[in-house]
Amino acid sequence: MNFLVETLRFIGLSVYYWLESLVFLVVPRRKKNVSGEIVLITGAGSGIGRLLSLKFASLGATLVLWDINQEGLKETSRLASENGAARVQSYVCDCSKRQDIYRVADQVKKEVGDVTILVNNAGIVTGKSFIESPDSLVEKNMEVNTMAHFWTYKAFLPAMMASNHGHLVSIASTAGLTGVSRLSDYCASKFAAVGFAESVDFEMRSLGMTGVKTTIVCPYLINTGMFDGCRTKWPTLLPILEPEYVAEKIITAIRQDQEILLIPRSCYFLLCLKGFLPVKVAALFADYLGILDFMTSFKGRAKKD
């Protein structure tokens, strides 16, 4: 009897959720108010982190900005204040160091309060073949792109659970959904970030923490300088994304409690294809899309080993 009841419940809810998803393709979801929320954004000194800061500021949020770049932080703080943020507090934090994250997190709790929206945005890329990637940069990739998420969750998730209110946002990548040549360490770190965020989301659901939301963001190449020099083979299908467009999509996804956001939309179709194509066909398709060699002309930003 339990099997029959559970099976009927599963089928009924599956149909309901499918219909709900189809409705949301036509009717936009209601956007939640983030005014008064305490929003922490890592990597806020430039790029997508800065744009997200300005958009949250215009919505009346209290901002907590982290970056290793003090000058970038100052500029983002200034712009956010001018954009209407309820309050802006910035902290120099090296997200590759666990103890630094915990130390600054304690400061935030004492000086600002409990973070209610956590945006793990800080990231780096090596951009070399696996054999040519220095060990130190491989480790740094994992520390910034993956392990930092563990430590920020450890620092801020307990308060969200205590009040059953909060939002965990992981800025990952489409490289966290499929392997890419010359991005072995980056792909590994982003795959891990996606898996980690999904796992915590399931934990929250199993604990009945319906007020703690999760959004995983997987964009294609963004024109921020991080992947400077890269080219896309078919820009109509897989365009290099403009930062302003991506930031607006992320803010909308957060405000609508969207669980996963792939940008551009074509990535949803491509991800579905990956699930059932034979390996050789998938590799052929990757070559056709230019994924095998789009990193050939990579320049990126200067990094220290």
Image (cartoon, grey):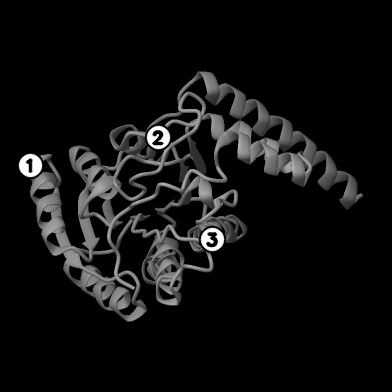
Q: Are marks 2 and 3 in contact (CB under 8 Å)?
A: no
Q: Residue at x 40, y 34 (%)?
A: 240
**Coordinates of residue 292 in the picture (x, y in percent):** 57, 46
**Vertical order, 63 against 269 (above or below):** below
Q: Are marks 1 and 2 in contact (CB under 8 Å)?
A: no
> Is residue 39 shown left or right of residue 27?
left
Q: Which residue matches tag 2?
A: 240
| Real-space CA distance between mark 1 and mark 3, rounded to the nearest whole angstrom | 40 Å
Q: Which one is closest to the eye, mark 1 or mark 3? A: 3
| Real-space CA distance between mark 1 and mark 2, rounded to the nearest whole angstrom | 30 Å
Q: Name which residue type carries label 2.
A: Ile
Q: Which one is closest to the eye, mark 1 or mark 2? A: 2
Which label's residue is closer to the chain start, 1 or 3?
A: 1
Q: Residue at x 48, y 68 (%)?
A: 132
Outermost bottom residue = 99
Secondary structure found at label 3: helix
| Real-space CA distance between mark 2 and mark 3, rounded to the nearest whole angstrom | 20 Å
Q: Name which residue type carries label 1.
A: Glu
**Vertical order, 15 against 95 (above or below):** above
Say which of 136 and 213 sits in front.
136
**Corner quadrant of residue 104:** bottom left
Q: Which residue matches tag 1?
A: 82
**Vertical order, 72 against 251 (above or below):** below
Which label's residue is closer to the chain start, 1 or 2?
A: 1
